[in-house]
Image (cartoon, grey):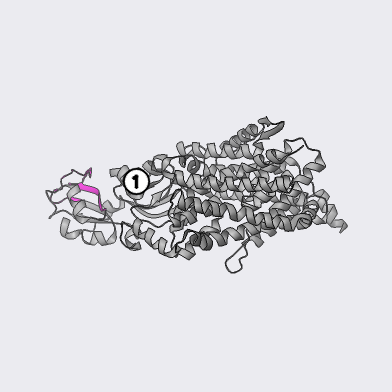
Amino acid sequence: MGTVRWIISTAPEIFLLLAIAIGTVLGRVKVRGFSIGTTACILVVAVLIGQLGTFKFPSLLRVILFSLFVFTIGYRSGPEFFASLSIRTLAQVVMALVLGGTGLILVLIFAFTFKLDPGTASGLAAGGLTQSSIIGTASGALAQLGLPNDAFKQQEANIAAGYAVTYVLGYILTLLYVPFVAPKLMGVDLKEEAAKLEAELSGGNPPQNENLHYRKFQARAYRVSTAAGRTVKDIEEEIGSRTVVERIVRDGADVEPRLDTILESGDDIVIAGRTASLVAAKPVIGKEIDADEILKAIPGNVINVLVDSRDLHGRSIKEIAERVGNDARGVYLRTLTRMSREVPLGPDTRVYVGDVMTLVGSTRNIERAATKVGQILRSGDRADIAFLATGIAAGLLAGLISFKVGGIPLTLGGGGGALIAGLVCGWLRSRRPTIGALPPAAQQTLSDLGLGGFIAAIGLGNGAAAWTAIQAHGVLLVGMGLVVTLVPLIVATLFARYVVHMNPVITCGALAGAMTVDAAVTGACDVAESQTPVLGVAVPYAVGNVVLTVLGPIIVALTYTG
């Protein structure tokens, strides 16, 4: 035991990394498809290891770790958050605000009724509303109060205790409520409603995936005979299926394939499109020829494009195609991905900022169309560290600003400031793609390491006190946590159904998004036997991440009595 205590005093970072590693492994274990999640597991492991001795970590380490996490959350949500401030997505925004506001009111009622300290109240909010970032923003707000060190550590321990007791319960309840309880509360069968929505998205016809997904991009060469004297537009329209004339070679020289270009007998042309359409092109144009050289000049490609145009936010695929116009010639949408989940495709499928379109076609055509939609995601992009560091620094500086309300300093703290900075930086990146690169893989790494390290430091540094608080208030916290999780979900469901009249399937996805519980979306999709619940996730997820995160300083300010 003496050796362990020597390591704790000499190199506590070893146990911090071990807590992250063990908690991450445990968080990935699934029992009948259910997993607790890495954040809760890391905290529990850290609290247990914290019983071995006294761990001391510099506050600078925790500030940097949490700032990395919350800045990344803001950066990822920024384009969606600002784009969501529009009339097209107003119902989903308001629903997320109703859920967060109801949760805040309940936490404050419990805090005043049972005389909860700011730490316990913040931990209750973080766990009951399943938003881990509240831990950091509440801790940052407490640090601004000038508390004695022992009192501050006790408040942090109470945050950890409140979160540890209520998070797992909140997570499980949300997983069960979204796919099973919410549909019954709305009086609908989720599977039937999903089928109706799919039919609506496909223009009233049963969805046929083979017509919505582009299977294989092909290009073939033909020598013009029957098509002589006709325009490119005439040929493309007769062949159909958005087939496009990519290249015209006349007497060894290229002719620009404009829509009004008239084809001449003997022209060699390249047609690109779906396989079935190209097979039907021969009687319209002329015989197919073996022309490797002109085909090599039309390289096919598959490119992921991040949608960042606010003008496209909330519009249907049909509307977007009309807006892009001729720039979409020869470009096909293979898949639409939202929060790493594939979205059902149809003419009326809504697209939101932050979605990823997988486009197929010739490189030239895709790059032309992509400029109208968003940013091309390239695997070779490197993170712009200077932009990242400057943004976090600006956020931490903004977090130092405080206002006194009734003699109590109200401040965002470093975490809140870093969140706001992340939102702004993510939005700037969407406006100017040449600056501020932070590829998705880098975002995930910073988010996981930042939150995991911060939670581990909190658990290790306050392990003994947190365990004592859990033993003292565990049963009461469980009861309060149950209410803080379920009541906001119920209120938000009724509001969405009977006030703003949202589609029930969209509502289920929106509930999961507003609670930022990704697994609840999967549950709703499984019950619906459809991916349509994903359609409601994006906007509430972005709003929920921001609104719930800033509850930390608000709860501290309203419950601190001096």
Say if 9 sits above or below 429 in the image.
below
Q: Is residue 87 magenta?
A: no
> Where is the C terminus found, in terms of image quarters?
top right
Residue visible at 61% across and 41% down?
Answer: 550
- Residue 205 at what x, y percent from top left? 30, 61
Q: Which residue is mark 1?
A: 320
Q: Is residue 244 magenta?
A: yes
Looking at the rendered structure, the kind of residue marked 1 is Ile
Q: Alpha-carbon neighbours of circle 1 within 10 Å: few (<14), some, or many (≥20)?
A: many
- Residue 321 at what x, y percent from top left? 32, 47
Q: Which residues are magenta?
A: 242-268
State the residue in front, 274 or 228.
274
Q: Is residue 249 visible?
A: yes
- Residue 62 at what x, y percent from top left? 70, 44
Residue visible at 45% across and 62% down?
Answer: 190
> Where is the N terminus found, in terms of image quarters?
bottom right
Say if 560 sits above or below 359 in the image.
above
Q: Tell me the element at label 1.
A: helix
Q: Is residue 19 visible?
A: no
Residue visible at 75% across and 49% down?
Answer: 158
Report how many numbered discs are placed on residues in the image: 1
State the residue in front, 280 or 338.
338
- Extreme residue toward the right, this view: 2
Is 280 left, or right, of 189 in this rendering?
A: left
- Residue 476 at what x, y percent from top left? 72, 56
- Res 274 → quadrant: bottom left
Is 298 left, or right, of 397 in this rendering?
A: left
Is 269 left, or right, of 310 in this rendering?
A: left
Residue visible at 76% across and 45% down?
Answer: 155
Is 388 left, or right, of 2 in this rendering?
A: left
State the residue in front, 503 or 127.
503
